Image: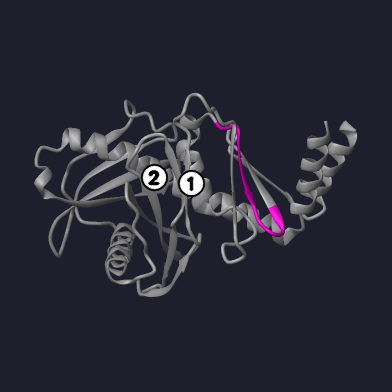
Amino acid sequence: MKKLLIALLFLGINTYSQKNLDARIAEVVTEGKTLYKSEMASWYGTDLFVEKYKTPENIGGYFSYSEGDTSKCIFFSKGENPKVIGTIIFDQTYDVKAAKAELEERIFSEKENDLYVIRKKALDIMTTDTIFKRYKNTNPNLIPIISNNEKKVYVLTGPSNNGVVIYGNDYLLTFDNNNNLKSKKILHANIIPVNFGNKKEVMIASMHSHLPATGDLITATDICTTMLYEKFTGWESVFVTSQKYVSIWNCKTDELAVMTTEAFEKIQKYESKK
């Protein structure tokens, strides 16, 4: 029977691993890890900058981006024509002791200016557009990215309380080459809080489902959120189910496997009979 289980798993992952699906999987993993790098730089960069910068009343905001093997958290001044007032640079370890702080005032680079502009426009849109929802004990996190000649701002919902991971209530705004809004999309139809702080009920995995509007695969925001919190939750895996596929994120290796929902259900049925 163990051979049957392995065969089903192999079938579920490989029979449907055509080039188009492989490309989609690679794309969502790359995008998710890009978002994660940005958020990690923001998480640790804000603490370091506030510690080092002596005039916090000048801070107008911040954003982060990746450049090669480094991630940068950029802080800018207030006003209509802001300047960079500080940069915290991390290597791939995000070790705060190895981080480099540059506190010299300077103008934005071309890429930084575009990131600033699309982030500001996204923030302005959020204040007037009714598709964006706010929930108690949460905060919106805006992540501007520019890659493959595409300009995007993801909006994630982060918890303000400890012991909870929030999936859902996330959005994607895309912009053209002139930084004008092209489209806006709700990624998940609802908010999905997952509590992990109860030591009496230790979870080794988390699961949530996607409606057709969200898509067949795990989202880049799901991957980002999982990577941010997996070190605290103790989860081994995160499962995202849809009508066609089940996405399985390995929290130990940060790799994604995908099988058909049909194969996944057969495996569950077999496991329930053991």
Asked which secondary structure carries label 1, the reply is helix
Going by the numbered disc 2, the residue's amino acid type is Glu
Going by the numbered disc 1, the residue's amino acid type is Cys
**Residue in the foreground of this view, choosing between 240 and 202:** 202
**Residue drawn 59% across and 55% down?**
27
Tell me the residue that label 1 is attached to.
224
Position in image of residue 169 (x %, y %): 44, 57
Question: Is residue 243 found inside the magenta-colored segment of the image?
Answer: yes
Question: Is residue 98 found inside the magenta-colored segment of the image?
Answer: no
Label 2, label 1: how far apart the Cα atoms are? 8 Å
Can you tell which mark lies on residue 39? 2
Query: Where does the magenta region start and end?
Result: 235-245
Asked which secondary structure carries label 2, the reply is helix
Can you tell which mark lies on residue 149? none
Does the CB distance between marks 2 and 1 fall below 8 Å? yes
**Residue in the foreground of this view, choosing between 156 and 105:** 156
Q: Is residue 2 left or right of residue 154?
A: right
Position in image of residue 249 (x %, y %): 61, 42
Using the image, determine if residue 26 lies above or below residue 214: above
Position in image of residue 167 (x %, y %): 48, 49
**Residue drawn 9% across and 42% down?**
55
Position in image of residue 12 (x %, y %): 79, 49
